[in-house]
Image: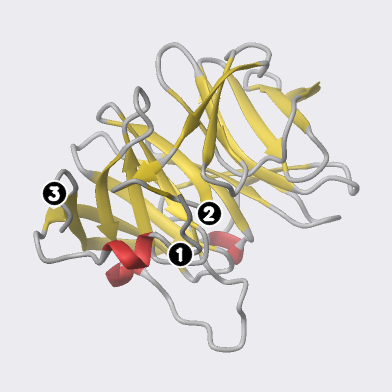
């Protein structure tokens, strides 16, 4: 590993069904429940189901003209982004009604710490935003060993780090939100599924669990959601696999 980067592989602790095998854009573990945003024009939904359920138990559809993306819990509200429409849905979890809020940039992933919201748009930048309005506050340039890390997709926040699925890879980056530097590089290949005939069935969906270093991971149209633990591995992963489409 490059100096200053911590390498990990994932240990799969278990797996649960992925109900509906959705086109996963966002994933949240909330106690014993799982929230999922599934994308597609005319098929985008926000859904909730008990962990381990074989079928979606609750589902709320988005308008046909939007493509649902990442989700983020904020107390008794939830943000759900859209891809190119630059509109977010702010869901009231008590009534499961929503209102629309405009924001700049495309929407991919979203997560939050105690003070701000972070969003990705598939580039090497993360935007820090007001948690109530999604108005931009500043931009975080994400780099590893001096190189831009492109393809930042679904986001999660845990242990003081932003964790990001990287594009079409099985790699996950742990990012220091104060500096934008990648501090942790995870090879999640042990949790992946192979779909030779479906190039869109990529890993996307990362949800922190209460236990330190543990997450739920899944992907678009995957059969399973896997419960994983990060295991230190100084020989893995290759920085080259993280830096697809690299540039300074």
Residue shown at 13%/55% (left/top)? Answer: 231
> Is disc 3 placed on a helix, strand or loop?
loop
Decide: is 82 above or below 235. above
Which quarter of the figure has residue 22? bottom right
Task: From the image, tell me which residue sits under label 3.
Answer: 3
Decide: is 140 above or below 226. above
Q: CA distance from mark 1 to mark 2?
A: 8 Å
Q: Is residue 73 left or right of residue 175?
A: right
Task: From the image, tell me which residue sits under label 2.
Answer: 151
Tag 3: Cα neighbours inside 10 Å, few (<14), some, or many (≥20)?
Answer: few
* Callout 3 touching callout 1 (CB < 8 Å): no
Q: Position of residue 7 (x, y in %)?
A: 17, 55
Residue shown at 18%/56% (left/top)? Answer: 8
Of marks 2 and 3, which one's residue comes earlier in the chain?
3
* Callout 2 touching callout 3 (CB < 8 Å): no
Q: Is residue 177 left or right of residue 9?
A: right
Of marks 3 and 1, which one's residue comes earlier in the chain?
3
Is residue 96 at least partly visible in the picture? no
Nearest to viewer (mark 2 / mark 3): 3
Task: From the image, tell me which residue sits under label 1.
Answer: 244
Q: CA distance from mark 3 to mark 1?
A: 19 Å
């Amino acid at each position: 590993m490059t100096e200053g980067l911590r390498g990990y592989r994932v240990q799969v602790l278990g797996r649960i069904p992925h109900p509906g095998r959705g086109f996963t854009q966002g994933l949240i573990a909330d106690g014993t429940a799982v929230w999922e945003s599934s994308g597609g024009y005319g098929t985008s939904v926000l859904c909730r189901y008990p962990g381990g359920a074989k079928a979606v138990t609750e589902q709320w559809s988005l308008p046909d003209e939007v493509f649902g993306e990442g989700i983020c819990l904020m107390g008794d509200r939830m943000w759900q982004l859209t891809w190119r429409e630059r509109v977010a849905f702010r869901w009231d979890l008590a009534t499961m009604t929503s209102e629309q809020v405009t924001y700049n940039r495309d929407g991919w992933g979203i997560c939050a710490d105690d003070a701000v919201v972070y969003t990705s748009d598939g580039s090497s930048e993360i935007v820090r935003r007001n948690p109530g309005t999604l108005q931009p506050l500043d931009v975080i340039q994400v780099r590893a060993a001096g190189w831009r890390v492109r393809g930042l997709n679904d986001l999660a926040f845990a242990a003081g780090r932003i964790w990001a699925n990287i594009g079409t890879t099985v790699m996950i980056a742990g990012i220091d939100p104060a500096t934008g530097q990648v501090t942790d590089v995870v090879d999640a290949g042990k949790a992946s599924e192979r779909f030779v005939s479906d190039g869109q069935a990529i890993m996307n969906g990362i949800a922190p669990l209460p236990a330190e270093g543990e997450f739920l991971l899944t992907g678009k149209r995957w059969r399973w959601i896997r419960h994983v633990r990060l295991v230190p591995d100084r020989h893995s992963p290759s920085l080259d696999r993280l830096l697809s489409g690299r540039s300074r």
